[in-house]
Amino acid sequence: MRLSAIAILMTLVFCACGNRNQRFNMDVAVDVTVQKLSPQSIQEMVTVTGDLMPAGSVVLKSEMPGEYYLQRNPQTGELFKMGDKVRKGAVIIKLEDKAYRNTTNIEGERLNLEISEQEYVKQNALYEKGGVTKRELVNAERNLVSARKNYENAQINLDKMSVEAPIDGVITSLPYYSQGVRVDQGAEMIGIMNYQQLVLDVTLPASSFGRVEPGQRSLITNYSSSEDTIQGEVTQLSPALDVSTRSYKGRIGIGNEKGILRPGMFVNAAIVVEQNDSVLAVPPEVVLSQMGGKFVYVVDKETARKRIVQTGLEGRDRIEIVDGLKPGEQVVVEGFETLRDGSKVNIENEVRITL
């Protein structure tokens, strides 16, 4: 009996101490950080990754053998080099071969064309006056067509002696050859890329089928510089799912006028599939679960209050609150882990959620 009485007494002492500690914990103010709610926009996104590709890319090879002469960039006055911007039609390299130039006979073909044009004009005038037959006029026209084609072919052959930029872009490769050295036909001359416009081919999950559509915005982020976000647009989508991977292909076009991104970069693309404006939203980690419901802690007169909420769209770093909160209320975003309903709090920092 005496031992039982001692055990009961010790249990009562421990319970009293526990209740006293619980009241102490409720009375000690917990340092917290809060965010003051204000209406904003929230976007639900489908996130994919991939490697950037240039919208235009070309590698040019010599179409004929000849002596190599790299030209000067008219913008700098120096010989073209890798990294230089070029315009479509700019002559970057010339190949000289006197024997080849003579075979084109460009001057002779130009002279033949001029003579044929004059003869046709003469025959046409005579035909209108009845001075020549229809056959003679047709022959003059045939000769003119033949002379024009011969001249055009000679010009095409002569153009092979110049390496021109076929697109606007930047020189990305320029194999070194000494000025005047003879290069063979088929030798690589230059590589040009246009990365003011970029393309991102992506693989989309089957769960997004029917939700991702052409024309939707996409936020492109480079992993090595996550603070720079560039807007793109979904341009193409495959209409069929891959049975083995349960996915489908898509393509995103990206304007890169400032040159922030580069071909070959591995990037993240967040496609905006739905957007709600003028709503309340909080960081997803502050929405806690209990007994199948969701709640957050708000501060009311230096006291934490548990607030039951209903959620909506889930964005990359925020979740929409469709019921349970009002604009201007202060939601605990740091220090909520140890709170209970009724805990005293001390607001160390207050921030406002912005767009």
Image (cartoon, rainbow, N blue to C red):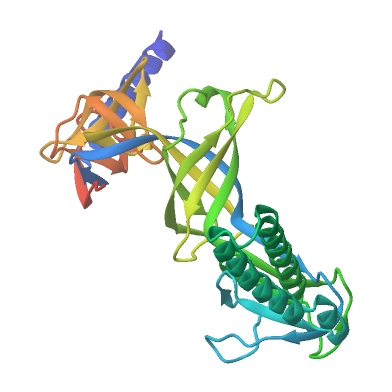
Camera-nearest residue between 283 and 240: 240
* Quadrant hosting residue 2: top left
332 displayed left or right of 132: left
Residue 65 position in % (x across, y down): 87, 77
**Residue 317, above or below 107:** above
Q: Residue at x 20, y 24 (%)?
A: 324
Furthest residue to the front?
Answer: 130
Q: Residue at x 26, y 29 (%)?
A: 321
46 displayed left or right of 313: right
Camera-nearest residue between 132 and 185: 132
Camera-nearest residue between 184 and 216: 184
Residue 49 position in % (x across, y down): 58, 44
Quick one: quadrant of the N terminus? top left
* Quadrant hosting residue 250: top right
**Residue 223, above or below 215:** below
**Residue 42, above or below 262:** above
Residue 274 position in % (x across, y down): 36, 31
Q: Residue at x 23, y 45 (%)?
A: 35
Q: Residue at x 65, y 88 (%)?
A: 79
74 displayed left or right of 272: right
275 displayed left or right of 207: left
Q: Note whether residue 30 is visible.
A: no
Residue 26 position in % (x across, y down): 23, 34
